[in-house]
Amino acid sequence: MNLSLQLARRFRRGKSNNRYTSFVSLSSTLGIGLGCFVLIILLSVMNGFERELRDRLLAIIPHGELFSVDQQGIVNWRVFRQVLGEDPRIREVEPYTKITGMIQQGSELKAVELTGIQVNAEKPARWQNEVSDQDWRQLRADQNQVLLGQGILKKLGLKPGDKVSVVIPAITDDLTFAAPKVLYLTVAGSVHVGGELDNLIGIMHLATASEQAGIRSGAQGLRFQFVDPFAAYSMIREIGNGFPQAVYMSDWTRTQGHLYDDIRLVRVVVYIALSLVIAVACFNIVSSLVMTVKEKQSSIAILKTMGATDSQIRKAFVYQGLLNGLTGVFWGTLMAVLIAPNLSTIIGKLENLLGIKVLSGDIYFIDFLPSQLQPRDVVLTVIVAIALSVLATLYPAHKAAAIQPARALH
């Protein structure tokens, strides 16, 4: 076996004679392990939020929109829908008309954003979990039916079958003021997207929405679902700039992009903060090795007189500190790899046991704590922790190699 590694193992076992040195060494190992564990867990949670944002929220809201600048709407929208739908980068093109108004129920008023879409016989795949089959069938039954977000139904005390009136602004071509219109609708059921959208969203028939909004072509705009939602910013501008009609352009990064920005920001902050925690734990390696060098001066001097080189002594203390770091990294990473994939289940059981809710569906777009373990996060965390552990050994190793036998044995 390598002499330096043998010395490292002997010094590591021998330091147990000094309880304080052993405590500092143990605390460094525990600190590194805890830092790796928490860092991997939190990165997995951030990955989970990003996955849910992509698979849940971005499956419902349009990735991009083109809408007319005037009341004419999108001229020949059926042709554009067919042509654009042939682009392999576009998953779906859908006509829509949007109305913003106030729902009045008794003395209560609630802002609502009604979106008129084509209500086909078969429910679209992206609405499978957000709208029940029964509510979708009820929506199809009548042109004046509407699906409202659960938050709206709860606030106004509405239920399926109730009649509601929606006050919508009257838009004129010359931008003069006109008396608002009142649209009478019947509640067909609910939509549950999650978060603030449940307090605003509404779905109705495209023909009814276009008629009430005064859209002469039958569709105010086109909504897009892209194969890669994170390419929406460039894609919608490419389509809009080449569109033969004057249109406004919008994409999900403008309306919901703050959620993605928050996730990325938290990921960076978490990584920096917990990397510093691991670095602080590595300072304990410095302390324990410095104390070990102080205690083992005589032993080091004897080894040098027996022919041990400065390089071998230096490597012995590097290996000793690295063993502490590797032990912490191994156990911390192992626990994180075992717990991270099952974190949602564990937190769910704790919520049921304690009667608390970590995430409220009324505030966030999900009501559970997501987690997705990615190998790159594990590898990067292990590399950073090991690198910091090695850096922490350099100064004590240099001090050990610099010991002069004549002075140490004096």
Image (spheres, helix red, strand yellow):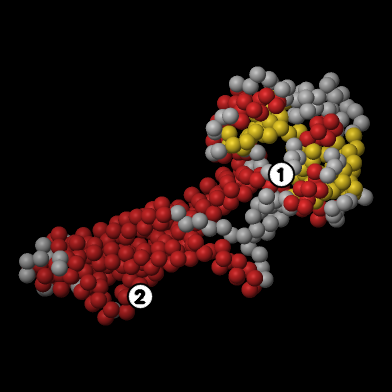
Give the CA separation, mark 2 to mark 1.
67 Å
Please identify the quarter of the rendering in which residue 296 is found.
bottom left
Q: Residues within 10 Å of mark 2 (few under 14, many from 20)?
A: some
Q: Nearer the viewer, residue 14 or 157?
A: 157
Q: Is residue 221 above or below residue 32?
A: above
**Quadrant occupied by the N terminus:** bottom left
Give the x, y percent position of residue 304.
10, 67
Foreground residue among 248 and 245: 245
Q: Which mark is residue 122?
A: 1
Identify the residue shown where x is 49% and y is 49%.
Answer: 268
> Which residue is most to the left?
306
Tell which residue pokes out farthest to the top in this image: 244
x and y percentages locating residue 71 in the rendered image: 79, 24
For image coordinates 60% across by 21% down, the residue present is 242
Q: Is residue 62 above or below residue 396?
A: above
Q: Along the horizontal axis of the image, is 23 left or right of 271?
A: left
Which label number is shown at residue 23?
A: 2
Identify the secondary structure beneath mark 1: loop
Q: Amino acid at mark 2?
A: Phe
Image coordinates for residue 289, horizontal then vertical, percent: 27, 67
Say if residue 71 shows up in the picture. Answer: no
